[in-house]
Image: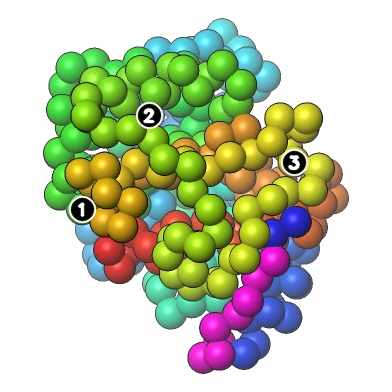
Amino acid sequence: MMTVTMRPRWPALAVALLLAGGAAAAVGGRADTDPVSGPKRYDGRFVFARIRYADGYAGGRFAGRPDLFWAHDYPRAEQNLMRILEDLTLINPYLGRDGGAILKLDDPALFTYPFAYMSEPGYWRPSEAETVGLRNYLLKGGFLIFDDFRDDHWFNLEAQMRKVFPDLRWVELDATHPVYHSFFGIDSLEFDEPMYAPSIPIFYGLFEDNDPAGRLLSVANYNNDIGEYWEFDGTGWLSIDLTNEAYKLGVNYIMYALTH
């Protein structure tokens, strides 16, 4: 289990986070139709940006709709995370029923959002325009989280990101990296009873110029699905302890994106 050391300037956060697992109620229903992009115009609020893509195989509630595979855990995952962000930080997040913005990687509007999230990259195959769009987004300051994938799905993510950055290589991260201390002090990245047990969660980072001391462009939550913890918070289906760990990761990723 990850342990957390709270920053002194936020003495009430430890108690608040322990209560957050049951406090963040889901709003709205599941994505039964095509999700729509959130705010109609930029107004200064932080907006959770989810990346959509066309390829892939959709299962579960998205069966028969491979164009919605990217929407796993939508919209409750981002709704719940944004409520945690509002409760525990000074950030003013967008709290719409649609969760946030939904964009393709070749959409120029993506540059409005410093943080982006992609689910199920094991089935992601970007077009040439999307490849160029992602490269430009990351080099100009964007930060992308890959989540909800495991086992041999890694090889697809690695292959697609080589198209984006042929010379960059993923580096395994540990809890000493600044991204895990950008808000909460996370001292361990080990998960007890992880989502994809017996697979062990591993966190990988992609760095500008392959420099582990430089800017982190992207994080891959391999053998993990922190979006699932966000989505089912308050349902009793998943451990509150693990849900809280997933929230800590989400808040830290956002803070890192806003400060680097």
- Compared to residue 121, the image places residue 179 above or below, namely below
Name the residue rendered at 27%, 49% in the picture: 211
Name the residue rendered at 23%, 46% in the picture: 208
User: Residue 86's x, y, as percent?
Assistant: 51, 71
Q: Which mark is residue 141?
A: 1
**Residue type at the position of mark 2:** Arg
Secondary element type, mark 1: loop
**Residue type at the position of mark 3:** Pro
Mark 3 — residue?
194
Quadrant in which the N terminus is drawn: bottom right
User: Residue 22's x, y, as percent?
Assistant: 77, 63
Nearer the camera: disc 1 or disc 2: 1
**Residue type at the position of mark 1:** Gly
Q: In the shown orientation, is residue 29 left or right of residue 214?
A: right
Mark 2 — residue?
52
Spatial CA distance of label 1 from label 2 is 20 Å
Secondary element type, mark 3: loop
User: Residue 49's x, y, as percent?
Assistant: 37, 46
Secondary element type, mark 2: loop
Q: Which colour scheme appears in the figure?
A: rainbow
The local crowd at label 1, few if under 14, some if 14 to 19, many if 20 or more residues have their Cα within 10 Å, is some
The local crowd at label 2, few if under 14, some if 14 to 19, many if 20 or more residues have their Cα within 10 Å, is many
Q: Is residue 9 magenta?
A: yes
Spatial CA distance of label 3 from label 1 is 31 Å
Nearer to us in this view, 236 or 177:
177
Q: How many marks?
A: 3
Which stretch is magenta?
3-10
- Compared to residue 155, the image places residue 31 above or below, namely below
* N-term mark: 3 or 1: 1
Quadrant in which the C terminus is drawn: bottom left
Residue 163, by quadrant, is top left
